[in-house]
Image (cartoon, rainbow, N blue to C red):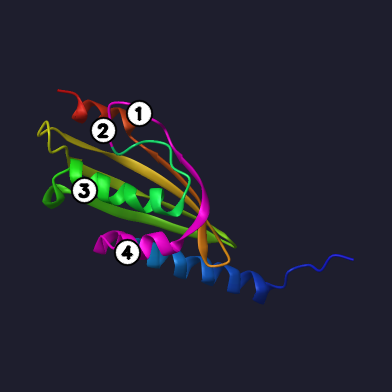
Amino acid sequence: MPVEPTAATAMSAAEATRAVVQEFLDARLAGDTARLTALFADEVDWVLAENPTVPWIRPRSTAAECAAQFTELMEHTVPEDARASVDTFLVDGADAVLTGHVSGTVRATGKSFEGPFALRLTVEHGRITRHHLYENSLSIADACAP
């Protein structure tokens, strides 16, 4: 007979998810790729609409590839122009959804991009197993175009 999760069990799963996602955000802000690599599972369900004109947007599936996205983003954008804000941080068990706004400038073109984003993360056994990012990819692609 299956055991139904109790409110305490569900709360502790949500608390654990929130803590890992907060650590992910802190590591991103610090540019700590070693910490990011440790936070991602060995295999990650990574979704970010592939865009051949944007050098940091490509398929990824390993912890190291996922963590490297931050480094690649910083190589191709102007760090002092990078802005991100989180408006909503929802957690339901192992899943978290963040919504907000992102903006920046592409180093090679000097063009800026901006728009809303939604990020869905799933945390299992203390590591991120799902990273689905939805953003204004048209604005980013336009900023990368010469």
Q: Could you tell me how far apart the alpha carbons at marks 1 and 3 are, in whole angstroms?
A: 17 Å
Residue position for label 1: 51
Identify residue type, mark 2: Ile
Relative to 106, is 37 on the left or the right? right
Element at label 1: loop
Circle 4 residues within 10 Å: few <14, some 14–19, many ≥20: some
For residue 135, above or below residue 74: above
The image shows residue 48 at horizontal and vertical percentages of 42, 38
Which circle's residue, 1 or 4, is located before the other in the chain? 4
- Which disc number belongs to residue 140? 2
Asked if residue 63 lies in the magenta stretch, the reply is: no
- Which disc number belongs to residue 27? 4
Which circle's residue, 2 or 1, is located before the other in the chain? 1
Element at label 2: helix
Residue position for label 3: 74
Element at label 3: helix
Which circle's residue, 4 or 2, is located before the other in the chain? 4
Element at label 4: helix
Identify residue type, mark 1: Asn
Residue lying at 26% horizontally and 45% vertically, measured from the top left: 72
Q: What span is colored magenta in the figure?
A: 27-55
Quadrant including the N terminus = bottom right
Q: Could you tell me how far apart the alpha carbons at marks 4 and 2 are, in whole angstroms?
A: 23 Å
Which circle's residue, 1 or 3, is located before the other in the chain? 1
Asked if the residues shown at circle 2 and circle 1 are in contact, with their CB atoms under 8 angstroms apart, the answer is yes
Asked if the residues shown at circle 4 and circle 2 are in contact, with their CB atoms under 8 angstroms apart, the answer is no
- Outermost right residue: 1
Q: Could you tell me how far apart the alpha carbons at marks 2 and 3 are, in whole angstroms?
A: 14 Å
Nearer the observer: mark 2 or 3; the answer is 3
Q: Could you tell me how far apart the alpha carbons at marks 4 and 3 are, in whole angstroms?
A: 14 Å
Q: Could you tell me how far apart the alpha carbons at marks 2 and 1 are, in whole angstroms?
A: 9 Å
- Which disc number belongs to residue 138? none
